[in-house]
Image: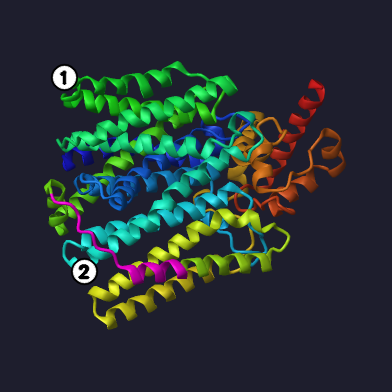
Amino acid sequence: MNRYLLIFGIILLIPGLIAVDFALAFGPASWAISQKEFWGTPISNFVFWIGLAHAGTFFSAILLVLGARFQHRIALIAEFSTLASLVIAGSFPLIHLGIPSRFDAMIPFGNVRTFLINPESPLTWDFVAILAYTTASTLFLLLHLLKTKFSTLESFRRPMAWILFPLVLWVHTIVSLDFAVTFVPEWQGAYFPLYFISGALFSGIALVQILLELLKRHVRRIESLLITFSWAMLSFWIWEALTKNIWHPEILVFGFLIPQLLWIPSLRERSMVRASAALAVIISLWWERILLVQKNPLDWTWVDIGLLSFGIGLFCVLFALLRIFTQKFFAKALDEESAEELPKNLFAKRPFFFSILLGVFCAAGFATYFICNASAFPILRIVPFLLPIAALVAIVSLSGIAAWKIFSKSKVIVSFIAIFCALVSASAWIYRGHETAYDEDYIQVKAEKTQTVRSEREAEKLFNARCASCHGKDGKFNKKFVREYYPLPQKLSRERIDSLGVDSLSQVILNGRNYMQAFRGRVSESEANALVMHLKKLAEKNAEAK
């Protein structure tokens, strides 16, 4: 199965990578997007894949904490799907931002780089939460694999699961707040965190069900969970229909009615029916995310289809490679999946409480440091960072204690020093106080004559690729994005453009000003002039429309 899944994934991944390259080169104008909300298919796919990533924590951590009998039969499948989904989910915000090489700009660490990161932005909340979740899930998987060779590690699994338990709920709560804190009425509501968590677990259960069918494994409790969560999601869909007049019959058919077929014993015994019901759930929740982000019908491009192919292909490739790696080096872990015995009820109490206290101490230290460096922000604005930071420190320290138990002390000390030096070096590079001008190798301006804009159409394409993310295709700003991450800039009306002049505005584009990023090295002087002239035409068109 691994080989066929790998081949299938590579076939889908090739056109997906072409779409990603095109999206990075041409920016938001290359995919379907509404200028009112700004978010397009990359954010829809991000929310969808981060939901699928909850499968691993739900089955491997929460069910382990609860002592579910069937947990060990699906644990590795769920953990593999988590890591693969997290890698895919994390790539879509970088595609959306357009500058993957500057991901470090989302790390909230005070005003130490002459550029203060906004702690009120959900972009930074997401980054910290997903970083903590990815690191914790990776360490949890390593602990699971290594315990087959070092039985001492069994006592550390439940403590780590207890730390992951609230983290998985927190991550999707933060994702839901990306929507709830905006100015869009349809996205506002106190129920949004529960709504997103339920949808994430529902899709994660469906993904595990499909993977079980591919492996020819039958776990009845998964089917029961599918039915249970279908009713839970129905309550949310009815609530939205009654309170916000949001109703999509196709989601109801795929997400609720088709899973009800599993009530019928003769159908429930058929592998094809179980797989089809789970696939229907995934389709419904993916489409729900698309409609959530893009409320109005948009004209899809080939890039939108390519990004979907990228996600599915990369998941198949990563999942197959993880299975192959485990089969080669940790075969006993795969043998556990067919075992009938329950996990041993062991719990390392002292390491657990020590790691929790250390995590709380570090989170408090972060809050204190940030307040001292950015005292203008209310303390409540940094609360979304605290649990992920505390959980990350706790799980890393717990993993360090586990390593101390099974490896020689000298190796652990040397490894700790090496990791510490690597982190310090990375931090020094990230926070070295560099300017905020961008320098991207793949679009370096090699010669002025090769970067001359020859027509208004070329100027429009350049504006959509480089400027529309903040200024909007119509020149009226993407207020949602700008208010979320930057102070709202001044409107560039026809009068203001005339008063500043083309040369002056071209220098602003090239060298930057205030929160306007410098584009020298990304556009030439002739291109900057063409962008100003295009912006002037937009201003004239907007003035005539009034």
Examine the structure image and report whether residue 259 is included in the region drawn in magenta. Answer: no
Of labels 1 and 2, earlier in sequence is: 2
**Quadrant holding the C terminus:** top right
Residue 345 among magenta residues: yes
Mark 1 vs 2: CB contact within 8 A:
no
Res 331 → quadrant = bottom left
Image quadrant for the N terminus? Answer: top left
Whole-number angstrom distance, CA of label 1 to CA of label 2: 45 Å
Q: Residues within 10 Å of mark 1 (few under 14, many from 20)?
A: few
Looking at the rendered structure, the kind of residue marked 1 is Ser
Q: Residue at x 44, y 60 (%)?
A: 391
**Few, some or many C-alpha atoms within 10 Å of disc 2 (few <14, some 14-19, many ≥20)?**
some
Q: Which residue is mark 1?
A: 266
Q: Looking at this rendering, what residue extends furthest in the top direction? A: 249
Magenta stretch bounds: 341-358
Compared with residue 15, is residue 166 higher up or lower down, i.e. above or below? below
* Relative depth, front residue between 218 and 334: 218
**Residue 279 has which mark?**
none
Front residue (pair 434, 279): 279
What residue appears at the point 51 percent right and 40 percent down from the top-left corner?
A: 193
Q: Is residue 483 visible?
A: yes
**Disc 1 on helix, strand or loop?**
helix
* Residue on which disc 2 sits: 152
Does residue 527 appear anywhere in the picture?
no
Say if 171 sits above or below 472 in the image.
below
Position of residue 487 relative to residue 478, above or below, is below
Where does residue 509 sit, x and y in percent of width and height?
Answer: 70, 48
* Residue 269 x, y percent position in the rendering: 16, 25
